[in-house]
Image: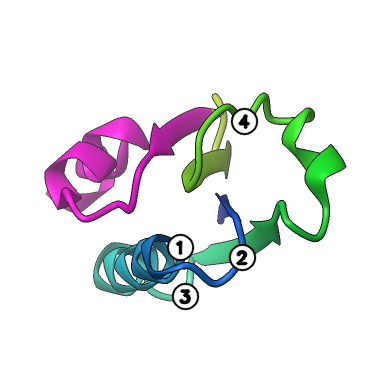
Amino acid sequence: MWNLRLYVAGQTPRSLTAFSNLKRLCEEHLAGRYDIEVVDLMKNPHLAQSDQIVALPTLVRKLPEPIKRVIGDLSNVEKVMVGIDLELIAKK
């Protein structure tokens, strides 16, 4: 099971794009094997410390370990796949 956490700042176009891109990527490669938690730092700014968030949006792969991070709106599919090691799953 993949545990993914997407840190955003409100409902900005960049945040919505990141979520949409992440959802599409997960459905294509991890259907039924992922969980996405969206953390809005406008509502819970203290949560940024636990994952050392310095830019938004940021995707954090919590599981499988090790923890991986990708910053941006996740529109570059190849970069995201490499960043969270999803390319290894896609090739299997």
Residues 38 and 42: in front is 42
Q: Mark 3 and mark 2: span between their CA atoms?
A: 27 Å
- Against 70, residue 75 (above or below) is below
From the image, tell me which residue sits under label 2: 10
Which of the two discs, 1 and 3, labels the residue nearer the N terminus?
Answer: 1
Q: Are marks 3 and 2 in contact (CB under 8 Å)?
A: no
From the image, tell me which residue sits under label 1: 15
Q: Secondary structure at mark 2?
A: loop
Which of the two discs, 1 and 2, labels the residue nearer the N terminus?
Answer: 2
From the image, tell me which residue sits under label 4: 53
- The label nearer to you, 4 versus 2, is 2
- Against 31, residue 74 (above or below) is above
Q: Residues within 10 Å of mark 2 (few under 14, many from 20)?
A: some
Q: Secondary structure at mark 4?
A: loop
Q: Quadrant of the N terminus?
A: bottom right
* Total residue callouts: 4
- The label nearer to you, 3 versus 2, is 2
Q: Mark 1 and mark 3: span between their CA atoms?
A: 23 Å
Residues 86 and 48: in front is 48
Q: Which mark is residue 32?
A: 3
Q: Are marks 1 and 3 in contact (CB under 8 Å)?
A: no
Q: Residues within 10 Å of mark 1 (few under 14, many from 20)?
A: many
Q: Secondary structure at mark 1?
A: helix
Q: Which mark is residue 33?
A: none
Q: Mark 4 and mark 2: span between their CA atoms?
A: 15 Å
Where are the magenta residues, as a range? Answer: 68-92
Q: Mark 4 and mark 3: span between their CA atoms?
A: 27 Å
- The label nearer to you, 4 versus 3, is 4
